[in-house]
Image: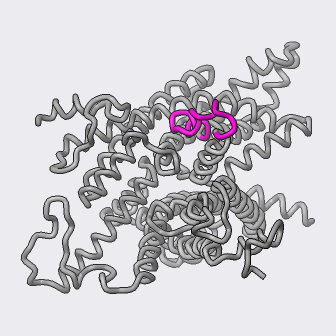
């Protein structure tokens, strides 16, 4: 049906246009965004958990590391962080590989304004195919997101751990639980209801941070929207059109609004579930409504 | 070239005053500090103007959201949802291409395609939406006793709002609004990465920081400089907003005053 676009018109033209190979890349990029969220959210939660535990530690150096990690991400624009981390991480990995793989290399790595490691230490190797470079870029970006959002999650979890009523901890100690047992059996199960408002906010922020992938050099939805929306002349494509970038970005806007709305509804349900049986105002209200 | 000469050449470079070309080789620390500092002029420009104008719109939208009238409430809710529910980065892109399209039919729209007006418009609407949500929350928590007292004094309409509701709303909202202001300033770094062109390499602080990082392959110098500037800016904002906060709280006994706490809530 789409073999001869010149004869098409109206809706069928649009349908054929929206299913060209390049558009499939755009839809694929939407999948990349979802993948990024699916990878980053649990990883950031994990980093955040360790950060919060470290900040609470009674061993000063560990506590300083935890607090420093939380504090350092504040006060600085996050995209500066993203752009810094991606280069720093990339160079860090290459530097470590360089130390391992080429111990005999005697030239300095920083030569003026160049960063040179031996060819075997390049990451990914310059001989590897294009898709390896893209996948590597994606993972570096995902890791960067996880580190930055881990700090925010650590901040939230740290607050949540302190919000658990102290009498709960005292009761656990009165029952003879060790510090470790108190932590895992009393503190951790109870902290989530205090952490959830902060974490859901963070999730919304994370959704809204995904277009920044574009700045990290990943071919994401913003890249494709610019690419596909630009004016196309008949010489280069079967589907010539004017400057449609406005409409592509309008589409992205709608995509994000829908995503936000769905997340809001889902998080409300999770909150209702977590509130059940808790000694909070919300829990009390639920109990009264049920009775 | 001494550092003073560098400052003379580049301190106002972001406004197109001074040396024409950016440094290309042998980057000194002085150059990086000066040029990134020069870019901060843009960040402050965007931040201050959108904050001041956004404040007025935000108050109006917050009142609209609390309104009983359906046709006032719904548009206000939608306005807040659209600007808070989508990434600022995509909003910038959309607005830029929208202005480009409009320019073709209405030539008067031309200034909107450059950053100083176009990006400012987006930031203005965006911060208005975020602040409106903060003010709306504060409006709902104005104590009932305050408005009852105003009623019993025979106040209504504008005087009641101006003298009773508004000051209390601001007082309750102020700590959250301070964070909003800080994040607005952070968000201004997105402008020149989102379609709006930096004509003649006149960009903001992040634009120059990434310029240096690209040229030297060394992110460990320009980004910490940028971070330093922003931490300084953040401290200034906290100081200024703290003064206002003191003014808003001065009629209260010591222990009931709300203290400013810097609780960042990241990107938008």
Task: Find residue A287 and report its horizontal and vertical position in percent.
Answer: 85, 64
Tell me which residue sits at (48%, 66%) in the image: A145
- Is residue B75 covered in magenta? no
- In the figure, is residue B192 to the left or right of B14? right
- The boundaries of the magenta stretch are B104-122
**Which quarter of the rendered picture does the N terminus of chain A lie within?**
bottom right
- In the figure, is residue B140 to the left or right of B249? right
- In the figure, is residue B62 to the left or right of A238? right
Residue A273 lies, with reference to residue B257, above or below; the image says below
Residue B32 lies, with reference to residue A175, above or below; the image says above
SS majority, magenta? helix
Tell me which residue sits at (68%, 34%) in the image: B106
Task: Find residue A9 and report its horizontal and vertical position in percent.
Answer: 81, 68
Q: Considering depth in this image, is A176 or B175 the residue closer to the camera?
A: B175
Tell me which residue sits at (60%, 68%) in the image: A171
Task: Find residue A211 and report its horizontal and vertical position in percent.
Answer: 56, 61
**Which quarter of the rendered picture does the C terminus of chain A lie within?**
bottom right
């Amino acid at each position: 049906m789409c073999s001869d676009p010149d004869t098409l018109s109206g809706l069928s033209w649009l349908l054929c246009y929206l299913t060209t190979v390049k558009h499939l890349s755009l839809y694929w990029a939407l999948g990349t965004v979802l993948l990024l969220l699916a990878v980053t959210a649990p990883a950031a939660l994990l980093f955040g958990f360790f950060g919060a535990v470290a900040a609470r530690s009674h061993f000063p150096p560990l506590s300083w590391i935890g607090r420093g990690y939380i504090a350092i991400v504040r006060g600085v624009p996050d995209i500066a962080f993203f752009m810094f981390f991606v280069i720093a991480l990339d160079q860090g990995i290459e530097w470590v590989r360089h130390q391992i793989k080429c111990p005999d290399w005697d030239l300095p790595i920083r030569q003026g304004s160049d960063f040179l490691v031996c060819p075997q230490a390049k990451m990914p190797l310059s001989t590897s195919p294009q898709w390896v470079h893209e996948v590597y870029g994606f993972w570096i970006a995902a890791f960067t997101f996880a580190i930055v959002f881990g700090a925010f999650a650590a901040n939230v979890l740290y607050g949540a751990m302190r919000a658990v009523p102290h009498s709960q901890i005292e009761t656990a100690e009165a029952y003879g639980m060790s510090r470790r047992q108190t932590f895992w059996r009393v503190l951790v199960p109870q902290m989530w209801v205090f952490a959830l408002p902060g974490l859901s906010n963070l999730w919304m922020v994370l959704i809204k941070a995904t277009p920044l992938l574009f700045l990290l050099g990943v071919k994401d939805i913003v890249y494709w929207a610019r690419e596909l929306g630009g004016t196309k002349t008949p010489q280069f494509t079967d589907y010539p059109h004017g400057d449609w970038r406005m409409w592509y970005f309008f589409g992205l806007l709608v995509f994000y609004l829908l995503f936000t709305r769905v997340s809001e509804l889902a998080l409300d349900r999770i909150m209702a579930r977590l509130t059940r049986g808790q000694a909070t105002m919300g829990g009390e209200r639920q109990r009264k409504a049920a009775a | 070239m001494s550092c003073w000469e560098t400052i003379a050449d580049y301190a106002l470079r972001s406004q197109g005053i001074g040396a024409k070309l950016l440094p290309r080789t042998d980057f000194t620390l002085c150059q990086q500090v000066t040029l990134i500092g020069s870019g901060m002029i843009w960040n402050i420009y965007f931040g201050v103007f959108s904050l001041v104008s956004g404040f007025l719109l935000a108050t109006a939208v917050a009142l609209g959201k609390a309104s009983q009238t359906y046709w006032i409430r719904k548009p206000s809710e939608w306005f807040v949802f659209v600007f808070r529910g989508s990434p600022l980065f995509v909003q910038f892109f959309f607005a830029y291409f929208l202005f480009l399209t409009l320019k073709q039919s209405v030539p008067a729209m031309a200034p909107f395609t450059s950053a100083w007006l176009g990006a400012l418009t987006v930031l203005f609407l965006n911060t208005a939406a975020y602040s409106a949500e903060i003010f709306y929350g504060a409006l709902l928590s104005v104590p009932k006793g305050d408005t009852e007292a105003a009623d019993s004094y025979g106040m209504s309409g504008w005087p009641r709002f101006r003298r009773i509701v508004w000051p209390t709303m601001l007082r309750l909202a102020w700590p959250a609004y301070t964070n909003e202001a800080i994040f607005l300033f952070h968000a201004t770094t997105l402008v020149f990465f989102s379609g709006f062109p930096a004509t003649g390499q006149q960009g903001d602080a992040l634009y120059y920081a990434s310029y240096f990082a690209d040229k030297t392959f060394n992110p460990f110098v320009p980004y910490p400089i940028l971070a330093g500037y922003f931490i300084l800016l953040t401290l200034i904002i906290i100081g200024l907003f703290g003064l206002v906060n003191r003014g808003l709280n001065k009629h209260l006994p010591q222990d009931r005053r709300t203290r400013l706490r810097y609780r960042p809530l990241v990107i938008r």
